[in-house]
Image (cartoon, grey):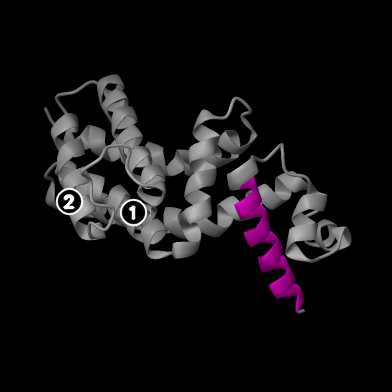
Amino acid sequence: MAQSDTKTKIIKTAEELFAIAGFHHTSLRTITAKAGVNLAAVNYHFGCKEALLEAILDRHLLPLNESRRRRLQAVADEVDGSGRPPAVEEVLRCFTEPTLALLHGDQAAGYFRMLVGRSLSDPDQTVRQHFLGRIRGVLEQLLDLLCRALPHCPRESVAWRLHFALGAMSHTLIFQEQGPLLGGLDKSTPLDEVIEMLTDFIVKGLDR
């Protein structure tokens, strides 16, 4: 097996096991046994379990963050040139659309969504700290642009509203894979419809 194939197999196996059993309840030996590789391969490619976790997060978050940053910067450049404040909806879509499209467009991202969901409720902060550390810069960029879209609101108020909005988005991402909590919701609803409903809901909460 090529080194690149071995590395990818280790990452995918660890992602699945971390999502199901948790980061601290999954040993490197369990990962290597399921992946069919030896412990030396993990040490060679990653060095330690925490570095393996970072590789999992980077696999999904690096392209996602790049897409969100690029779109947010495009809106900022446009409003700087026109002198108009950005619309709340156009700012929000820079974040929601890439997030939902990338994670739902990749069937392999199901375990990643589970891992993120677990990190948000797990008493241990290891995964959560690494996850939040990788998205904090994008969230600050999003908050700055939302403050420009809502000049009548204090920054703290906008931050709280964004906090609630992220909760709605996280809930949608996490439970979309497992099935909704409420009966009567169609799990097969097309992604573009989910984005529209979620965006409309959040925009009304942000710009009230």
Q: Is residue 197 magenta?
A: no
Residue shown at 72% from the left, 38% from the top: 25
Residue 86 in sight in this render: no
Q: The residue tagged with tag 1: helix, strand or loop?
A: helix
- Nearer-the-camera pick, 83 or 131: 131
- Nearer-the-camera pick, 95 or 171: 171
- Nearer-the-camera pick, 49 or 71: 49
Query: Could you say where residue 83 lies in the image, as x and y percent from the top left?
Result: 13, 46
- The N terminus, quarter of image: bottom right
Q: Is residue 149 left or right of residue 136?
A: left
Query: Could you say where residue 161 lies in the image, as x and y percent from the top left?
Result: 26, 27
Determine which residue is flagged by label 2: 196
Q: Residue furthest bottom?
A: 1
What number is the disc on residue 62? Answer: none
What number is the disc on residue 100? Answer: 1
> What's the CA distance linking mark 1 and mark 2?
11 Å
Residue 70 occupies quadrant: bottom left
Find the magenta span and give its range: 2-18
Does 98 appear above or below 151? below
Q: Residue furthest right?
A: 40
Q: Is residue 141 left or right of residue 182?
A: right
First along the sequence among labels 1 and 2: 1
Q: Is residue 125 left or right of residue 120?
A: right
Residue 55 occupies quadrant: bottom right
Residue shown at 60% from the left, 25% from the top: 123
- Amino acid type at circle 2 is Glu
Does 147 appear above or below 77? above
- The C terminus, quarter of image: top left
Q: Is residue 3 magenta?
A: yes
Residue 22 occupies quadrant: top right
Does 201 appear above or below 71? above
